[in-house]
Image: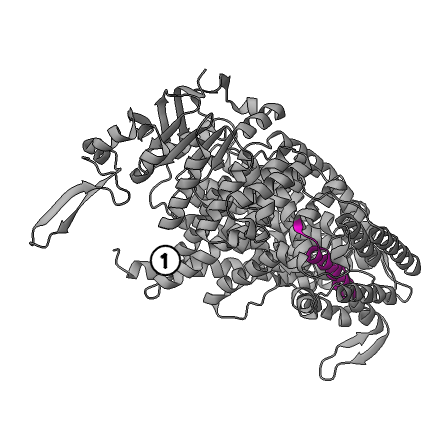
Amino acid sequence: MMLFETTHLTYRYDRLTAIEDLSISIAEGSRVALVGANGSGKSTLLRILDGLYFGQQGTVRFRGEELSEDRFGDDEFAFSFRRQVGLVFQNPEVQLFSPTVFDEVAFGPLQLRWPKSEVRKRVGETLERFGIAHLKDRVPHRLSGGEQKRVALASVLVLNPAVLLLDEPTAALDPRSQSQVIDLLVEWGGGAKSVITATHHLGDLADIADRCLVLDGGRVVAEGPPAEILRDAELLERTNLVHAHRHRHRSGELHSHPHVHSGEAEPGD
Amino acid sequence: MHIPDGYLSPKTCAALYVGAAPFWYVALRRVRKALHTRLVPLISLFAAFSFVIMMFNLPLPGGTTGHAVGIGLAAVVLGPWAAMLSVSIAIVIQALFFGDGGITAIGANCFNMAIVGALVAYAVYRILAGRAAIGSARRVMAAGLAGYAAINVSALLAAIEFGIQPLLYRDAAGAPLYCPYPLSIAIPAMMLGHLTIAGFAELTVSAGVVAFLQRSDPSLLKATAGGSVEIGEPAAGRNLRPLWVGLGALLAFTPLGILATGSAWGEWMARDFSNPALRREIAASSFHYAAPLRAPEGLARLSQVWTAPFARYAPPYVRSAAFGYLLSAMFGAGLILLVCLMVGRLFDRKEPAT
Amino acid sequence: MKLSARHGRGAFVPRTIEALYQAMERALDAEHSAASSGLLQRLDARVKVSGLFALILATALATRLWVIAAIFALAALLAALSRISIRLLASRVWIPALAFTGAIAVPALFLTPGDGLYRVPGLNWTVTAQGLTTAGYLLLRVETAATLALLLVVTTPWMQVLKALRVFRIPVVFVAILGMTSRYILLLLETAHEMFESRKSRSVGALHGAERRQMAVASAGVLLSRTFQLSGDVYLAMQARGFRGEVYLLDDFAMKRLDWLALAGFAALAAAAVWAGR
């Protein structure tokens, strides 16, 4: 049984078609990257996989169970799903709405009605693990970007979900915070856990994924391991994942080639 | 028009809580079914918006405060029940955090602004908008007028609630225990501010934001469009000026309409016949037949039918100077609006299009 | 939060937004309310909600001025015992209420029929004894009730107030929306604040009347749109972590001896006030 399976999935928002006739399957225990420029549909797909949006056409199955709005009306199913799948949003502010950091991390377990003693213990452990125990009484939306990201991650990972969905995990972070986040993810993953990351940071790909799905205009246009995708310069340029701009060499020559700014992976390697 | 604590007697407050309860109940039941959908954050959003709008208020001596509410907008987007809930929540937060509007008066404030306001706004909107396309100018106008109507009905209710307090609740020495202003003061005081400034503010907010939504997110307006109505393309560079002109004219001429009916009421009184001056006029216009000294019996009896209920139910303010001020204010507001529009048009023409 | 329209037109709206934002932030700030260890902060939220509400009700029911004044004095005493600064009370409640209710109540001094006390020289207006009493009722009631409400929200974390409302059987939908709205108000004010800041740095020269109007309406629309986007995402994020509407707190309410004493105290005082003021 597949972890996720979509069949002819189409999602429209007003007059815009965000996902078009998408049929993919993701196996248990895999590390997948949804790669695409802004507007390619990868964020939308993540939300559909997390049962927050529901497509107008087609189906989405999680471990064989269909995800539909009606299904989520059932408390038991909803709780079971939320326990197993966690989504970290791109903008941490969206995820920080509790009075203190401790409350924030405790929110999920409380909603899922864990026993109070259990909640306290697990929250304490998670705060330690993410190095934010010293922030536990602080107001979340007044923290720095990197700290907020760690709180957001902690608030989802405290539930120890089997599946982690991440929307642009390194967006708007300074380089040090970025590498910290990547380290955290690498450490957390492995074994039976599945990770699906939406990103356009090509430099992270090799670390966080074994398999890439390239999205463009709501469709999958390519698929394969990171190394293979990164070699395909034409694809990357066509889907707006790299750009070419001119620079002047010392000799005075004006030069231009497609390239990526961050990370060591270069197209053509 | 927030009513603070102490302006309404406990009995009045309790009565209005009781009046509000069934509406709250129905609204909550309906929303509960949609708890997991987009409706809930929308309700909260409009509550937040309404909250901020209501904070911009000015005191109206003889009444309470005048301000826009945002009920027109909420009713157009959310429908009457969710809108009721939305504005009620804004009122509760204001009462708790800012002492704006009393705790005991929450029922009254919600009844006036949220509940009756939502129903009036929705009804007016649906009637005026008809089956027009969602992107049409007609809907913008309908939304604006819906808000205007709603806020004025709310203000009128509040004014009536005030006005009856000094009649009913006084202490041993005769001092009013709660609101001291009778209907003859409360109604003009409240209506003056709301028919003009607050009403315009509400109209602008409703119309303006609905126009914006027509372009940015028309699906939000579908819920209250009713039946099979297509979205339609908002006309590029659509000119809303005719709407404003129409509105200005409406305001300028309405007082005349009220006056006209007023005079029909006021002057068909049997006792006019005993007024010598009037008798001369009647004679002059009746080929010099002398008018009878007393009203003919039949007329007297007939006029009793007209005047007795009038005397009992029509507020005394109809004949007071305050009402006259009120009418002039409406007339003046309409006039000012028309003048502004004309001046604006004049200047627009002078500047070359870029 | 009342405001005066007397400042320069351009600064009026941003200034108010700023003031609102800060007041709201402070109101919802857990750090702030949990900080001091005054009397009210130590009480169970349920006791505070019911007790303070009972006193507000007593204020409404009282028909004697001195009873209302006594409740006001009690409220001030509670504030002092809870280490709430006079400055906070004055700026949030006392002065605004005085200004606004004052403006509305002053005409009552002259318009209320009764025994004349004092004639204003120059004008033909007489202050009546009844007018004075009525103005007294109005002002005192508003000040007292608003002070009591403020005491509740300043000494109790907002989440606990919401939970207490649930305990008193206020429907879950209502409480859930109440909680979300307070977050959205902050979001809305923050976004508005940012928009004003960025607009200030971007303005190049004055705009014509029609353009300025268009911009104002467009800004309101953009503000709504942006906040809508954010708030929709906030709600999704809540759902993604299992939110179904109910309020859950880590620390259950538990009545201690002090709470029972306080409850009894509130009940007795409220009852006495109602009896004395009838």
In the image, residue C152 lies in the stretch drawn in magenta: yes
Please name the amino acid that badge 1 sits on. Glu
Res. A10 image quadrant: top left
Res. C113 image quadrant: bottom right
**Residue drawn at (62%, 26%) of the image:** A75
Judged by its main secondary structure, the magenta piece is helix
Question: B260 or A126, which lies in front?
Answer: A126
In the displayed structure, C233 sits above or below B346; it is above
Q: Disc 1 marks which residue?
A: C211
Q: Which residues are magenta?
A: C139-158
In the image, residue C138 lies in the stretch drawn in magenta: no
**Residue drawn at (32%, 35%) of the image:** A205
In the displayed structure, B128 sits above or below B228; it is below
- Looking at the picture, how far across and down is residue A262, in whole percent? 28, 44
Tag 1 secondary structure: helix
- Looking at the picture, how far across and down is residue B116, in whole percent? 66, 43
- Looking at the picture, how far across and down is residue A93, in whole percent? 49, 47
Res. C196 image quadrant: bottom left
Crowding around mark 1 (Cα neighbors within 10 Å: few <14, some 14 to 19, many 20+) is: few
- Looking at the picture, how far across and down is residue B153, in whole percent? 64, 48
**Residue drawn at (15%, 48%) of the image:** A246
The chain letter for the residue carrying disc 1 is C
